[in-house]
Amino acid sequence: QVQLVESGGGLVQPGGSLRVSCAVSGSIYSIRTMGWYRQAPGKQRDLVAALTRDGSTNYDDSVKGRFTISTDNAKNWVYLEMNSLKPEDTGVYYCNVQGRRTTWAPLSDYWGQGTQVTVSS
């Protein structure tokens, strides 16, 4: 059973910083990507940042230069460091891991329950 648990959300003023964390537990044979998605009220869930198996990163244009995704060496944690936050960054942030539980298992997406980030004065 793979489990993802986010933490670190909260209320922050515009221009402030926040780091959200995701604890990854359970057995995953092979991880393809680890990432963070954001869902604003009334909108779809969109990719914010992703880290691939080869170490390359991918950011949505709206967060480039402000957000940084990282993991620990064991890939038990995924972090999203958010700086210069704007009101439009408000939303529920979901952790995502895409991988296979075994060599023959299909590629699957695993999700956390989300953590709320609100940027407001």
Image (spheres, helix red, strand yellow):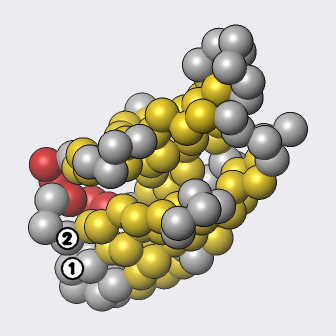
Residue type pointed to by label 1: Ser
Q: Position of residue 30 (x, y in %)?
A: 60, 34
Q: Residue at x 40, y 65 (%)?
A: 70
- Mark sitting earlier along the chain (2/1): 2
Q: Is residue 50 above or below residue 118?
A: above
Q: Could you tell me which secondary element the residue under label 1 belongs to?
A: loop
Q: Nearer the viewer, residue 48 or 86?
A: 48
Q: Which residue is mark 2?
A: 66
Where, by quadrant of the figure, is residue 43 drawn? top left
Q: Could you tell me which secondary element the residue under label 2 belongs to?
A: loop
In which quadrant will I find the C terminus?
bottom left
Where, by quadrant of the figure, is residue 80 drawn? bottom left
In the picture, measured across the screen, residue 108 lies left or right of residue 80, that is right
Q: Position of residue 55 (x, y in %)?
A: 33, 51
Q: Is residue 119 above or below residue 55?
A: below
Q: Is residue 58 above or below residue 81?
A: above
**Residue 24 tag number:** none
Q: Nearer the viewer, residue 6 or 58?
A: 58
Label 2: how many residues lie within 10 Å, few (<14), some (14-19) or many (20+)?
A: few
Q: Which residue is mark 1?
A: 84
**2 vs 1, front mark:** 2
Q: Residue furthest front?
A: 103
In the picture, measured across the screen, residue 47 lies left or right of residue 34, that is left
Residue type pointed to by label 2: Arg
Q: Position of residue 91 (x, y in %)?
A: 45, 56
Q: Position of residue 99 (x, y in %)?
A: 59, 31
